[in-house]
Image (tube, grey):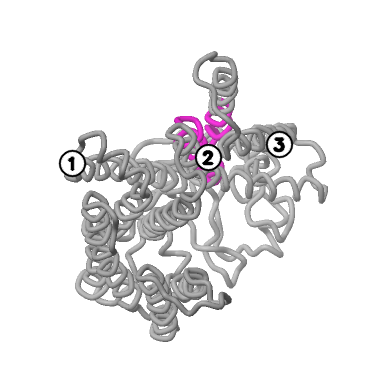
Amino acid sequence: MAAWGIVFPIGMVLGMARSKWHVPIQSFGIVTTLIAYYLGHHHGGRAFHATAHGYLGSYLFWYLILQASMGIFLKAHVWQDSRLRRGIVTTHGIIGKSFPVVAWVQMIFGGIAALGFCFGEHTIQCLAHFMMGSAFIGYGIILLIMLRVGAGFLARKGCSQEFLDSWVIMVWGIINTFTEHDFMQKSSHWSHKDMQHVSAGVLWWAGGALGIFLSRNGKRSVVPGIVIAMTGYAMSAHEQSLMFSMAVHKVFGYALMAGGAARVIEICFVLHDSPSPPTDGSSPGPSAFQHLPPYLLTLAGLTFLSATEEQLAWIADSGMDHVTYTVILFSGSFVIYLTAAIIVEIYEYCTKEPHGVDVERSGAGQRWHGIPVPYMPSFFPGAGNRLGRLQISDPSEGYEALPLTATSEPFSPDVSRSSEMHRHAVIGGMKPRHPDDEVVFEAGEDEAGVDIDRDWRGD
């Protein structure tokens, strides 16, 4: 769990950020996984019959070997300009980003196998609880990601978070409407649960359609929050066979209602219909209140995931009351949200560019915030002093607005891609490889010590 739930996700964001720590962290995770795999098959203790956890584990072993092999190939830096290498870079990135999802599924299967639940007539109910609970947890984590690092993405796409949420809500509502009752059977009987589940599906697709309409063109909308709150209201009164189960489902419903209400308050009274502020240093970033909706969704998801009939009957028979169980669920949701927040924070830290860099040139050298920086002549390839990544300043001249970089040669804003930037050194005597390349140098290392050419190639 530590390797797949913590180490690999951290290594994933380090890889996305082009950090030099990506390979060491992932290597540590691979070694830990291999040790755990060996111990799991040679401990000589409790034996399990064939389960989904065992089958998926066998596939994940080769999944990991494939990913590691692609990483080794990319680090070898062979066939640099080949189509094969570009395809492997893309595949390596996709598989790497899927690790948190498959790890979560495997951990769920592990819990089921250890407790011996979800067999026979309980399979469908377990599937519904685990899918819906995981969906709410995933929704909360996605909201956290968009809150911390998604402002730029939403601005570029010209849409609001609620527009994306409403599409997901509508599609899920359509699926829920036609799968919670067998419309093809001859009997017209509707059970109490059929009515509740199908009505919830109608609520979702109707509310999702309204949310899509109201949040078009980048507008904010309270409809997704209302849909979530109404779902919580319905689930808080969901009929159950055990009083213990009724109490736990009430906690689930209350968490959803609180999360939906917090989302409405955030949009209307915290942000005043404005987009979430970016965390790039130009603003204070998200407020403390904005962490409440994603956390409450995470709590609701974990509660529903932990509320199957077999689970709650087992907990009730153990003598534990619903208050103690609720406290345990709160603790678990804190750990999940903490892990997600740390991983997002690592990504933010690794991708954050320096702001307000003050570079002064003086005869024999340069100054950064008043601190002398030794001068390195540009006739030594790659010896220019770099205080940040090269960033281009004006899109009309082939540049993008990026942090100011100290150079060993004067930098003229009139230099364009097609002229001097292409012909000669821009930063410290290093040359761009191709006019269409964003920033690629012949040699040298960036401030983290990562080879620039290799870093640009994605490995």
Distance from Cα at disc 2 to Cα at disc 3: 18 Å
Q: Nearer the viewer, mark 2 or mark 1?
A: 1
Q: Earlier in the sequence, mark 1 or mark 3?
A: 3
Q: Residue 372 location, x and y as percent?
A: 39, 35
Q: In front here: 228 or 316? A: 316
Q: In front here: 65 or 269? A: 65
Q: Residue 287 location, x and y as percent?
A: 24, 59
Asked if 74 appears above or below 151 in the picture, the reply is: above
Asked if 227 appears above or below 346 in the picture, the reply is: below
Q: Which residue is mark 3?
A: 66
Q: Is residue 416 left or right of residue 405?
A: right
Q: Nearer the viewer, mark 1 or mark 3?
A: 1
The kind of secondary structure the magenta stretch mainly shows is helix
The reply to whether callout 2 and callout 1 are in contact (CB within 8 Å) is no
Q: What residue range appears in magenta?
A: 1-27
Q: Which residue is mark 2?
A: 106
Distance from Cα at disc 1 to Cα at disc 3: 46 Å
Q: Which residue is mark 1?
A: 321
The amino acid at mark 3 is Leu
Instruction: Identify the residue at image location x=49%, y=55%.
Output: 124
The amino acid at mark 2 is Gln
Decide: few, some or many residues near mark 3? Use Cα within 10 Å; few <14, some 14-19, many ≥20.
Answer: some
Q: Earlier in the sequence, mark 2 or mark 1?
A: 2
